[in-house]
Amino acid sequence: MIQKILIANRGEIALRIVRACRELGIKTLAVYSEADVQSLHVQLADEAICIGGPRSADSYLRADRIISAAEIGDVDAIHPGYGFLSENAKFAEQCESCNIKFIGPKSSVISTMGDKAKAKETVKKAGVPTVPGSDGVVDSESEAIKIARKIGYPVIIKAVAGGGGRGMRIAHNNVSFAKEFHSARNEAEQVFGNADVYIEKYIDKPRHIEFQILADNHGKVLHLGERDCSVQRRHQKLIEESPSPFLTPDLRKKMGKSAVKAAAAAGYTNAGTIEYIVDAKGNFYFIEMNTRIQVEHPVTEEVTGIDLIKEQIRIANGDKLSFSQSDIKFERHAIECRINAEDPARNFIPSPGTIGLYYAPGGHGVRVDSHVYGGYVIPSHYDSMIGKLICYGRDRKTAIERMYRALSEYLIRGVKTTIPLHKAIMSDPVFIEGKATTAYMEEFMNRTPPDLFN
Amino acid sequence: MDIKQIKQIIELMKRSELTEFAVEDEGFKLKIRRGGNGLPVVSQGAVSPPPFPTSVEAAPQAAAPVVASKDEEADATYIKSPMVGTFYTSASPESGPFAEIGAKVTESTVVCIIEAMKIMNEIQAEAKGTIVEILVENGQPVEYGQPLFRLK
């Protein structure tokens, strides 16, 4: 029976986990860096242990210190949140060998699904559609160009160890292929220490639609519907919503079944997400699996009414999932806007500093997941996300109007934020008509004057 | 001066526009300054933040922090923990402590053991001086940056 959890993370997700633990009557131990002494979750947790200096590499990425803190704190489980060590198979393995429950899937599953080429192979065997491409790593230019010709241009060359949009190049024809192939390999080597690449058909202006999975340790695998995350800037999500304005009920059913098959093929347990890209004709292709809880999980929580963090803890505890696929109802439309401390008028330059007046919106259909408060100093050492605003209603129109209203009330003085950007998107006809694909943000920024964001 | 009197002074300061208060007595000096790093206090009627931990080394964030200094502490250096684990004064239950009060240490003197995940790590002083106070107990869990010894 899990009675105490160490939270190996910071910011809003750490606060989220503290809240779930409190509702379950579980004690919390927060580990924090010297830059996070004044963090809200550190103040709210039952116990707190400082694990290092401000840099992530000196604190939140120090698996040894985290496990040490877990031992002296005598915890039963560690929740890794997202980012940091949440998809680090070695860390999960260390927890397993120290007899501390890692709230997530098994380390072997993290390892397999974390390798993009291996993940693709695994789900392909289960009949899940994948982007046509090479069967795994391509070593030589001659082999690569043969595959490119077979798939048909344009193609995308991707690093197996890649992420965040790096180690990727697009080739439109035989002439440019060699240059792009070697360029991708070089960047992959530099950034990830692994030059291995694979090749896929490049799908133009796709939508990014992902399915939330919950699987217990007793063989039950369910999906909790999709999230449309097409509004992205440089492969970083800005806005997520559910249900997707693009999917028909038929396509939703097909993709949901496919997601469950993919997770089951991977032997997945706990919470995870299957990511697809969907073209204009409704063809969907698996691209990768995220073996952790995600930033945008509240969107699914508001649509289904299911608390995902609590379910993660229950699953780690060995409990069976208390509901079946038919019990899950999708009754509302929910949208999330990520609030970043960045200046959208100045190319999104980060804006750390002290928050002066802080007033969060409220009222019917509004949820704010944020760890900041008036007087809080945003450290410069971590990512710029300072909160998430989630609005929901009986349909998409209500959710959008509510989001616009809530953004208008949201006051964060002293730093620049992306609130004006989100307001502009909520009033944009392309977004309102549900036509946004992954090409949307670039197109929107090109036609929007920067002083709209002041 | 006792803690009750100090609390009363802090309350008075909060309610007034005083930025600094100092008092001196035999062997005792007290100085209280508002907004520690000289920046003006920002929030007017802002949501009041959760209680902040007050400690001698932590950077003050808002309202009136207490910076209490006694004459003897003026020259203090601290040996702080470089890791997370359990503090032990000696190499084993039978052996004597590495460092006692009055002991002179140099940078490479081993002052204690911190045990993490069954590995005993010898901790060096990394400072020069005389130990005047041991701030933790044998067998106590310690965190990164926690002061272990006070040196002079």
Image (tube, coloured by chain):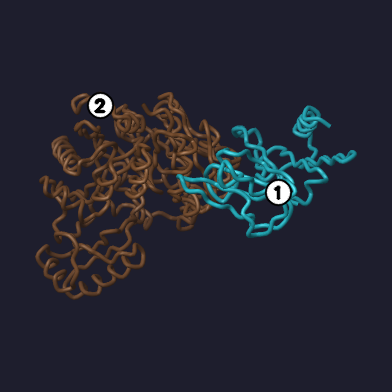
- Same subunit, labels 1 and 2: the answer reads no
Which residue is found at the position 23% from the left and 24% from the top? A323
Judging by the rendered image, the residue that carries numbered circle 2 is A320
Q: Decide: is A126 above or below A314.
A: below
Neighbours of disc 2 within 10 Å: few (<14), some (14-19), many (20+) = some
Residue A100 can be seen in this image: yes
Q: Is there a contact, CB below 8 Å, between mark 1 and mark 2?
A: no
User: What distance separates the C-alpha of mark 1 from that of mark 2?
Assistant: 54 Å
- The numbered disc on residue B37 is 1
Q: Which chain is brown?
A: A
Q: Nearer the viewer, residue A400 or A110?
A: A110
Which residue is found at the position 55% from the left and 39% from the top? B141
* Subunit ID for the residue under disc 2: A
- Image quadrant where one finds the N terminus of chain B: top right
Q: Which chain is cyan?
A: B
Q: Quadrant of residue A293?
A: top left
Q: Decide: is A217 above or below A291.
A: above
